[in-house]
Amino acid sequence: MDHQEDSIPMDGSFIVVPKDTLSSSTTTTTTTSQEQQQQAHTTSSSAAATTVATTTSTRKTITTTTTDGKVHNGASVSLLQKELQALSTPNKVFQNWAKTFRCVPEQYYTPSTEEEIIKIIHLARISGKNVKAIGTGHSPSDLACTDGFMINTDKLNRLISVDETKMTITVQAGMKLHKLHDLLELHDLAMSNLGSISDQSVAGIMSTATHGTGAEYPSMCASVLELTLITASGETISCSKTEKADIFNAAVCSLGALGIITRMTLQCEKAFRLENKQEPAKLDDVLNNLDSIIHSAEHVRLWWYPHTDNVVVWRANRTTKEISLPAPSWRTSKWFSVHVYEALVYICRFIPRLIPTLSRFMFWATQSKPIERVDDSVKVFNFDCLFSQYVNEWSIPWSRTAEALRALDQFIESGTVTDNEDKKSTTATGTKTAAKKEAPLKVHFPVEIRFVKKDDVWLSPAYGVDSCYIGIIMYRPYGKAVPYKRFWAGYEKIMASFAGRPHWAKAHSVSPEGLEESYPKMKEFSAIRQRLDPEGMFLNDYLRRHLVVPK
């Protein structure tokens, strides 16, 4: 069987999930059915107990006085458990959208009010449990995973207020973007920029610095004007750029590490349509004229098809033209672009040498002719994510984009990364050390390239620098695993060599020390995290792996 294998181990960088979780063959360690039953029995027993014992997967159990002035002991734990029982599902299996990460939280809560969240936090605090909030679970990493208490924010989805004059909206932070768009449309408003999908919650996209594309448009979290946060003590904090600004600057993009965000006020603009034009181009032509292309429209993105020199240049500008859609075609139909493509990718799992041919074929079939349309902004910004996938994405200064893409192309075709330090050393000494010969890679399309204006959000990957996001993908046809680790390892090495910062929602291998070097405000963020959550209630494996510097 001609099956491509990964040859570089990643030491668990992309397969780590919290302790005592179920697992898939592609992303977690295997757990037998007998072990799962034993875990469920153990977890259920501990949840029912009046006195909660400290375990290796929990924080220190404490007795505390909360904001109601009452001392909470084992009896009050039992009382809180009874009050919250209707909101709780014990041992519910959580998995992300791509089904690449999963976990089994001890309790899975679905509150509908801030008061209920405060009670959950009090219960977690006095029983020594960790807490993570989730929205849609779209992050392709273990960012949302926990073996403690998981809070599903789906019912925190109400509109609080709209100011049509100032073009702002305040909503509960669990609201999905689809609903937000519908509410904004009723008031003739829209978000200025969007990412590729609108399935996520408002808090989820802001807390991970989700972005769209556009040389004059920053990440979406830059549109947050105010927010409300419930901390580990149960305190409710309202903050903005002018009120408690240090907490606000840390909390806007905070990965859930500071507490549970329950409300957000967002800056919008008048509703608008976009005229979208996309056309085929050649990679060298694009890279040689990149600066002019970046500024050739309000919103520009590129899709490069690896193993070819084919690129799609996607442009969109605001317009007052009437809605106009391209004629239906089999080339752009869902049965072809999704179902036929998934079947072909599945075949390539067994014959990976066909991947370059598939890349050329799909470009010819779907992108070899210009496409134009005019539609409402949301419908132009958003795309179909097709099917399950591994993804990785980093931002780099957009002045380094052409260099980085050429390095990525060279790596894919040769299987070997030549980093910038090697090049500098060769120039200085006149000698070159022979690199280990690796087999060329076979990778899926597209490599997506987007451009984002710099912002001042402390943990935004675009903090202080106009940025280019370069995203790579390996599809999982019918949920089946495909090799990706060697591709990821080389890609990350290239991005790091160009002062790259990883997208927070994606699985990556950067250490806390490395992130402190990349983010000028990381130490200030860590100090606020320690101040608001000294016991680490909101930490999980992902956050410990990337935010907590070992003492």
Image (cartoon, rainbow, N blue to C red):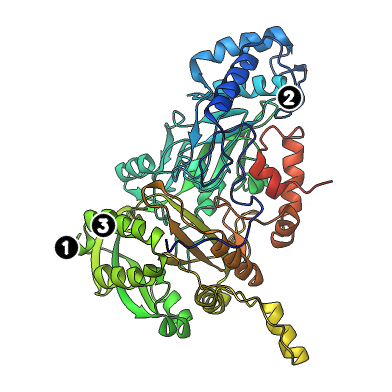
Instruction: Tell me if residue 262 can be seen.
Output: no
The relative height of residue 279 versus residue 373 in the rendered view (above or below) is: below
Q: Nearer the observer, disc 3 or disc 1?
A: 3
Res. 407 visible in picture: yes
Residue 115 appears in which quarter of the rendering? top right
Residue 288: where, in percent of width, then height?
47, 85
SS class, disc 2 = loop
Q: Which residue is mark 2?
A: 55
Task: From the image, tell me which residue sits under label 1.
Answer: 329
Q: Compare marks 2 and 3 and give the one earlier in the sequence.
A: 2
Label 3 vs label 1: CA separation?
14 Å
Cα separation between marks 1 and 2: 59 Å
Please, what is the three-letter code of the amino acid marked with disc 3?
Val
Q: Nearer the viewer, mark 1 or mark 2?
A: 2
Task: Tell which tag, 2 or 3, sits nearer the viewer.
Answer: 3
Which quadrant would the N terminus be assigned to in this image?
bottom left
Mark 2 neighbour class, 10 Å CA radius: few under 14, some 14 to 19, many 20 or more? few
Q: Residues within 10 Å of mark 1 (few under 14, many from 20)?
A: few
Q: Identify the amino acid type marked 1.
A: Ser
Q: Which residue is mark 3?
A: 340
Is residue 263 placed above or below 36 in the rendered structure?
below
